[in-house]
Image (cartoon, coloured by chain):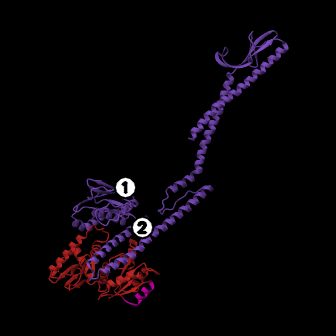
Chain colours: A red, B purple
Amino acid sequence: MKLLIIEDEKELSDSICSYFSNEKFTCETAYDFRSAIEKINLYDYVAVILDITLPHGSGLDILKEIKTNDKTEGVIIISAKNSLEDKLAGLKTGADDYLTKPFHLPELGARVAAIIRRISFGGKNQITFDQLILDLEEKKLRGPDGSIDLTKKEYALLLYFISNKNRVVTKEAIVEHLWGDEIEMANSYDFVYTHIKNLRKKLMQSGCPDYIKVVYGMGYNFTIAE
Amino acid sequence: MNILVMGIVFLLFSCSFFFVLNFVLVREVDKELIVVKSKLQTYTDQNHSLYKDRQLNDVQITYELTKQQITPTAFQLVEEYDPKEKRVHNFRKLVYFLQVGENTYKVRLSIDLQRINHVSRLIAVITVLSILIIITASLIINRIVLRKLWQPFYDALSTMKNFKLGSVQTLEFPKTNIDEFAFMIENLESSTQKAKEEYYVLKQFTENASHELQTPLAIIRSKLDLLIQDVDLSEKQSVIIKSAYMALKKLSKLNQSLLLLAKIENQQFRETENINLIVIIEEKLEQFHELWKGNDFVVTTTLNNNAVVNMNSELADILINNLLSNAIKYNLQGGTIKIELEKNQLIISNTGQPIPLNRDRLFSRFYKESQQGQGIGLGLGLFISYQICEISGIKINYDYKEKFHVFTVIW
């Protein structure tokens, strides 16, 4: 699947590219308005990551271009501007999501995965990961031994992990995803650990291998163990 | 003050006027006496005898044969009983010696001063009264006229007094026909306009700088996110990266806070609505639920479901978030948090360090009591809360009661 990253800061663009590059995704980049418009008109992508504060033209115009040409790309706006008005303007113009800088790459990962699910597979209602089948409509999980009961947070956590599989994700990123970044954390994220522990227990009790690998001092990696 | 001085001067003037008037009139009387004296002298010289009448021109004449030594002519002011009026009057007397033949006579010429005194008193009173009336009238007229004249000046001054640099309202200066004031007002308008523009540019700069920081922060974070994907990281490297992450988060939060402050001061949260705080609080309660359990907090809530305040909804959310976060962050393990929501106030209390916070500096920028590594306090949280309250027209207080740090918001 092809991703288009429209961001004038080359470093950031590179980071995003690196993060998404794996068997599933290939990334293309555009650093300014003109090349972005060109690429949009020449190629099809599954999703576009768009910075609206572009030089020589507003990112919102590119968004309008995508929408008027009846293209099916999902668009997520990344922007330094985080006022309510900017968010509303972006979503009203047709973006599927809005993420403010600075963000965690796994957060972008989760959002892009959500957009792709919604759009290219017509809101596909099932994701498969190794022995797990996640029903998105019912929000239910099925393992090798049958269905597994998950709390709301555990479900969101699992979805986050799957969207960022094979990537190391920090505890901070998880907390921000599940509880929003409004929460000024106290001294520890121990309660996150509890959720992860519970999720892991449930998965393993239903016959799955341990997918949640602890990366010491950093966070977690959701991966099919070797 | 002025009036006191004027009063004293006026009093002194009145007194001296009276005396001067008196003096002048008495001098006139004296001249009269001298005229009579010289007439008598002429008569005596011509006729070698004394003038027969005892009165000449209002002057009474008395002769006394005397063997006294001749003393120089003298004027006297005497009080005597006047048989005609049956009262004591003032008389002006001229006493001198007249030689007629071989006899020496002591001649006394006297004039009744009563009428003259009376007249001079009358003159004095009328004059003084007139002056008094004139002065009073002119003072009053002055005051009225001047007040109207200077009204534009005072109005302009009071407009300037209400001038606030960050406010968006344009100043309304009074209209006036007086050139000097019009000139002054013109200058005031242009100066304040210029000050406002420069201030706005500065504000924009702060906001733009903040925005500019977001992108490098995003880049750093993304690089760190990539760095940790490397499976070959040593423990030492992990620790270093973790440290970098923490610092970056702090920097991000700081930038966000500064941006928020700039926006608040820029009046970007001007829209207000009636908000029932119980909605926000219940939302936060659910969000923070995990943290409380994790830290073994005891949380008690008393919520009135009709606590409505008129303010900006985003700011209300941030305010309550700040207060609750602080209650968590600066609390002890197993501590207590009390949330009381009443119709017109919100009270959030928490246990914490046993020393009360410095009430005067508590709400200023970057205030931090040294904690034992509790939380990632930036010191801006309370300042932001304070600013939000200021701009929303509500009050926020701190108190330390019964081992609880108590924050109260009143509207």
Tell me whether circle 1 and circle 2 mark residues in contact (CB < 8 Å). no
**Which residue is under mark 2?**
B263
Which residue: 36% across, 75% down?
A: A102
Amino acid type, residue under disc 1 in the picture: Asp
Residue B376 bears which disc, if any? none
The residue positioned 23% from the left and 68% from the top of the image is B290
The residue lying furthest to the front in this view is B236
> Can residue B361 be found in the magenta stretch?
no
Examine the image and state in which quarter residue B185 appears.
bottom right
Quick one: A167 or B81, which is closer to the camera? A167
Q: Secondary structure at mark 2?
A: helix
Q: Is residue B365 left or right of residue B32?
A: left
Q: Position of residue A47 (x, y in %)?
A: 34, 84
Depth check: B64 or B175 in front? Answer: B64
Give the residue displayed 24% in from the left and 67% down from the top.
B291
Q: Chain of mark 1?
A: B
Q: What span is colored magenta in the figure?
A: A33-44
Q: Is residue B131 left or right of residue B317?
A: right
Does residue B33 sit above or below B207 in this rendering? above
> Tag 2: residue type?
Lys
| Residue A43 falls within the magenta-colored stretch | yes
Front residue of B246/B259: it is B246
Callout 2 environment at 10 Å: few (<14), some (14 to 19), or many (20+)?
some
Q: Nearer the viewer, mark 1 or mark 2?
A: 1
In the drawing, does residue A38 fall left or right of residue B120? Answer: left
The quarter of the rendered structure image containing the N terminus of chain A is bottom left
Circle 1 crowding by C-alpha within 10 Å: few under 14, some 14–19, many from 20: few
Q: Position of residue B131 (x, y in %)?
A: 64, 36
Q: Quick one: label 1 or label 2, which is nearer the N terminus?
A: 2
Q: Main secondary structure of the magenta part?
A: helix
Q: Which residue is mark 1?
A: B360
Which SS class for mark 1? loop
